[in-house]
Image (cartoon, grey):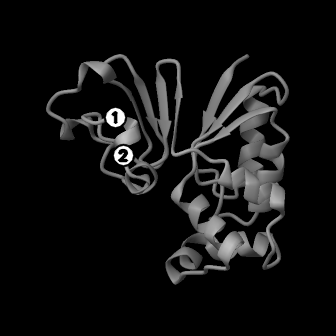
């Protein structure tokens, strides 16, 4: 089984399919780690989630746009900040709603972070000076300051052999 990671799909179905094709992704054998923000942006969120549901081994690390979409699906929340940043396209993808229960369950099943052997996947940020479980959802999903490890004077021994992937800040480095 190969493991693939992808982040910030933002409803771009055509790009998602190109990634699967070019990587020769096997829906039944390979593992896919989705690093948040499946929703908002491009107009094909519904198609993207339908496609991800076909993947046998798919883990979602929830992103801030996914949380906004989930708030809309569960409570009808439509804050202007969300709709102006692609939420309007998510709603349009579902013809104004409702979102199918399988899609809600997919988003609700999203994790704040995922540890896989010596790798950690988050959407937003993290502080290597504290354990992941001590982080708030706000930091793990929304923070964008972690992309620069120069912010940290020393990296604790527990994190020195981890490969950290942060989707929201487009950062990947072995620390």
Kindly identify the residue that appears in the image at 40 percent across and 57 percent down: 138
Q: Is residue 18 left or right of residue 66?
A: right
Give the quadrant of the C terminus. Answer: top left
Instruction: Sort mark 1 into few (<14), some (14-19) or many (20+) by Cα contacts within 10 Å.
Output: few
Q: Is residue 142 left or right of residue 154?
A: right
Kindly identify the residue that appears in the image at 44 percent across and 53 percent down: 137
Residue farthest along the left direction in this orientation: 153
Give the quadrant of the N terminus. Answer: top right
* Vertical relation: 44 (above or below) 32: below
- Residue identified by numbered label 2: 135
CA gap, disc 2 and disc 1 = 7 Å
Location of residue 34 in the rendering, given as x and y in whole percent from the top left corner? 63, 41
Kindly identify the residue that appears in the image at 76 percent across and 75 percent down: 92
Q: Quadrant of residue 108?
A: bottom right
The answer to whether mark 2 and mark 1 are in CB contact below 8 A is yes
- Residue identified by numbered label 1: 131
Closest to the observer: 159 or 163?
Answer: 159
């Amino acid at each position: 089984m190969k493991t693939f990671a992808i982040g910030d799909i933002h409803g771009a179905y055509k790009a998602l399919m190109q990634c699967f094709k070019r990587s020769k992704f096997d829906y039944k054998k390979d593992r896919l780690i989705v690093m948040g923000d499946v929703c908002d942006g491009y107009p094909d969120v519904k198609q993207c989630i339908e496609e991800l549901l076909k993947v046998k081994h798919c883990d979602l690390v929830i992103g801030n746009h996914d949380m906004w979409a989930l708030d809309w699906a569960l409570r009808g929340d439509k804050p202007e900040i969300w709709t102006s940043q692609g939420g309007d396209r998510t709603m349009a993808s579902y013809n104004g709603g409702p979102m199918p229960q399988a899609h809600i369950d997919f988003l609700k099943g999203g994790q704040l972070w995922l540890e896989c052997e010596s790798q950690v996947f988050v959407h937003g940020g993290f502080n290597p000076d504290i354990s992941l479980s001590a982080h708030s959802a706000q930091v793990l999903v929304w923070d964008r300051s972690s992309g620069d490890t120069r912010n940290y004077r020393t990296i604790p021994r527990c994190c020195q052999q981890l490969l950290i992937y942060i989707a929201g800040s487009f950062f990947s480095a072995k620390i």
